[in-house]
Image (cartoon, rainbow, N blue to C red):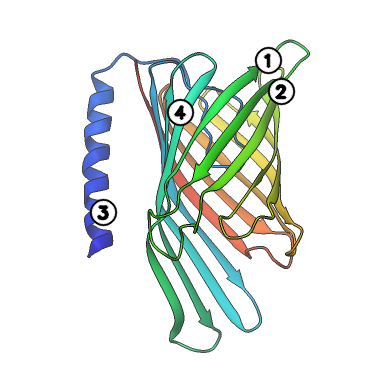
């Protein structure tokens, strides 16, 4: 019932947002940080609020057990303070289950709100004819907020350098490098991403991406995904993605879909 109430409120809010957008002036075409793992170097325009939300599901099949992780309403709020700086706030509703194969009963199930993660993005270098755009993204996942199974015991910081470079009007390359902490141990997880984007039409975009998480104490997690984006309007975008794990420690497969909206200034 709790999830149904959250979903109902979520739909009401989105109906109000879409209705507001119809009465607003259309703003220039936007760049989002979903559905792939590679964060863009682009900053939300000053005095604009960008809402990026969606659904993600991943399944891990092993010989003895199965893990299913579902993220509902994975929502990122981005507000532009200037041409080079934006504020960010991220939260989600998460469901995680663990079960042994050939058994109907689940061993463990956790459902609830995920932790709250405020942050910012700072544009360090604008793109030029022969130079990439570079941005610094930093955030901190907070303790004491969200379901006990998903929140850290102490502040968990994270940072990435986002680098992107266009090649002509249709092709672009982007990469992220950084690290994040889980709030439990002091050793960080190192992050890398590499994405290729292609604008098939003015409204339809395609991408392919490889990314991974490397930790000194645990096996590496490498993945590959791809997907599409479709601009319904210059300030409304739909997206979908699918991916697979490339290492023994990775999920077997994952899928996701979502919508992004920017409220004009």
* Tags 1 and 2 touching, CB below 8 Å: yes
In whole angstroms, how far apart are the C-alphas of marks 2 and 4? 23 Å
Which residue is under mark 1?
127
| Element type where label 3 sits in the image | helix
Query: Eyeballing the image, is 257 above or below 207?
Result: below
Q: Which is in the foreground here, disc 2 or disc 3?
A: 3
Residue at image position (77%, 58%) is 216
> In what quadrant of the picture does the N terminus appear?
bottom left
61, 145: nearer the viewer: 145
Comparing 194 with 118, the one in front is: 118
Q: CA distance from mark 4 to mark 1?
A: 21 Å
Say which of marks 2 and 4 sits in front. 4
Residue 167 location, quadrant:
top right
Percent x, y for residue 50? 41, 28
Label 1 and label 3: CA atoms lie apart by 41 Å
User: Is disc 1 surrounded by few (<14), some (14 to 19) or many (20+) residues within 10 Å?
Assistant: some
**Residue that numbered label 3 is attached to:** 6
Say whether residue 151 is left or right of residue 193. left
Which quadrant of the rendered structure holds the C terminus? Answer: top left
Q: In this view of the protein, can residue 105 be seen by the observer? A: yes
According to the picture, the residue beneath numbered tag 4 turns out to be 87
Q: Mark 4 or mark 1: which is in front?
A: 4
The residue lying toward the viewer, choosing from 264 and 230, is: 264
Q: Is residue 127 above or below residue 9?
A: above
Q: Which mark is residue 165?
A: 2
Question: Image check: 103 left or right of 175?
Answer: left
- Is the residue marked by circle 4 packed among few (<14), some (14-19), or many (20+) residues within 10 Å? many
Q: Position of residue 76 (x, y in %)?
A: 43, 39
């Amino acid at each position: 019932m709790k999830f149904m109430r959250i979903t109902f409120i979520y739909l009401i809010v989105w109906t109000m947002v879409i209705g507001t957008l119809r009465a607003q002036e259309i703003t220039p075409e936007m760049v989002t940080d979903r559905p792939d793992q590679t964060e863009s170097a682009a900053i939300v325009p000053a005095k604009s609020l960008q809402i990026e939300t969606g659904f993600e599901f991943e399944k891990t099949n092993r010989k003895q057990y199965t893990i299913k992780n579902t993220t509902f309403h994975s929502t990122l709020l981005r507000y532009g303070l200037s041409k080079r700086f934006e504020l960010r706030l991220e939260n989600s509703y998460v469901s995680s289950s663990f079960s042994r194969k050939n058994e109907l009963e689940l061993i463990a199930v956790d459902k609830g709100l995920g932790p709250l993660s405020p942050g910012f993005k700072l544009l360090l270098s604008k793109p030029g004819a022969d130079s990439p755009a570079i941005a610094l993204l930093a955030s901190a996942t907070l303790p004491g907020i969200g379901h006990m199974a998903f929140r850290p015991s102490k502040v968990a910081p994270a940072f990435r350098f986002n680098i992107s470079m266009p090649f002509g009007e249709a092709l672009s390359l982007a990469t992220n490098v950084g690290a994040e902490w889980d709030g439990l141990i002091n050793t960080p997880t190192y992050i890398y991403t590499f994405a290729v984007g292609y604008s098939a039409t003015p409204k339809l975009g395609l991408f392919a991406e490889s990314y991974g998480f490397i930790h000194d104490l645990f096996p590496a997690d490498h993945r590959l995904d791809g997907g599409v984006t479709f601009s319904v309007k210059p300030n409304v975008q739909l997206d979908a993605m699918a991916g697979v794990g490339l290492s023994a420690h990775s999920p077997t497969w994952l899928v996701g879909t979502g919508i992004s909206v920017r409220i004009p200034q």
